[in-house]
Amino acid sequence: MKTIMELGMTGNEKYRRQQKEKTEPIWLQSNAKERKRIHLAGLGDVGRNVALGLTILGGEEVEHIGLYDLNEAQCKRMEIELSQVAPPPGGRRIPSVSALAWEDIFSCEVFLFCATKSVPALGSEGKDVRMAQYEANRKIVALYAREAARVGYRGLFVVVSDPVDLLCMEALLASGKETDGKPLATDQIRGCGLGVMHARAAYYARKHPEFSLYLEEGRAFGPHGQELVIANSMDPEHYDDACSKKLTELTVGANMQVRALGFKPFLAPAMSSAVLSIVALIRGEWHYSAAYLNGLYFGSLNRQTPEGVEREQSLIPDLLFARLEKAFDSLKEIVWK
């Protein structure tokens, strides 16, 4: 049996960027008790709900939320509406909210990339809609990453738009092409997309007794898409490969159930992958996100510490590790083709 840190340790060295290039995110260098400034770019379906969720749930961790969108009316509307969210007297703290100019986007500790060129239309069932967004969204994230490098941004660069793992890598590589600035460090970039896959697996585990062990012992790994890996248990004596693959298949197709009803599935991703995961990330709590691992951004349970990213170090059953290797190699083929 192996640990997740051993993924991708064989093969061509050109696929791996040296870990010694790490730079601690700026918010870890300050007082951990200080509330953070979060700036969010992209106010589509997901971005609007992320902003709303952080306004309601993030007050203890977030001091201010800055909003940026090419649609100035949408941006102003969200500034007005979110600034009118308030608890009863004596209630919880609520972050302040303001619209941003382009030059102020990276004056923060945490930047959220929620921008997207388009969302696959209803009727795209049967396709990996996540991958359909890759080519368009990679150009947008590269633009923001180069700007972050140009201004010397040292905070967290969090990708929420799909596909998060591939867009994280695009941001890393694009920032290195900004000759007038300092490239983003590997551990500055995170992808928040796996949280909803864990939540969807838990949904089916609550509905079907055959998957119930997932609720106590299960884990989610890898990309938010067709190469997702769900494990019904991390205990070698309880891990069931067939059961895990069946639960994975249900989890991958969960969004299609919503699309079949005539709706785009953005509420659960906004809350599970982004809002709840980002709040946990800032707190230094365990959560699901994609962090840099041996040349790629790969999703797993992890937490942020003053020393960097700490991944869960459970020993992985051999059959499960083989599935993780396959998912890792599939990502590598896309990134380094």
Image (cartoon, grey):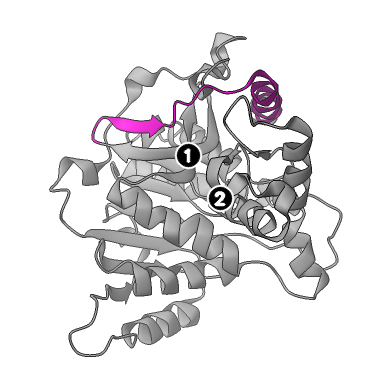
| 73 relative to 205 in the view: left or right | left
Residue 305: x percent and y percent?
28, 36
Give the mark, 1 or 2, whose residue is nearer the N terminus: 2
Is residue 114 visible in the rendered image? The answer is no
In this view of the protein, which residue sits in the foreground, 271 or 15? 271
Image position of 173 with respect to 122: above or below:
above
Residue 193 numbered tag: 2
**Residue at point 66% right, 53% down?**
205
In this view of the protein, which residue sits in the foreground, 260 or 124? 260
**Residue at point 87% right, 54% down?**
126
Mark 1 residue type: Leu
Q: Quadrant of residue 204?
A: bottom right
Mark 2 residue type: Gly
Residue 254: x percent and y percent?
73, 58
Q: Secondary structure at mark 2?
A: loop
Query: Which residue bears the numbered disc 1?
Result: 301
Quick one: label 1, few (<14), some, or many (20+) residues within 10 Å? many
Quick one: label 2, few (<14), some, or many (20+) residues within 10 Å? many
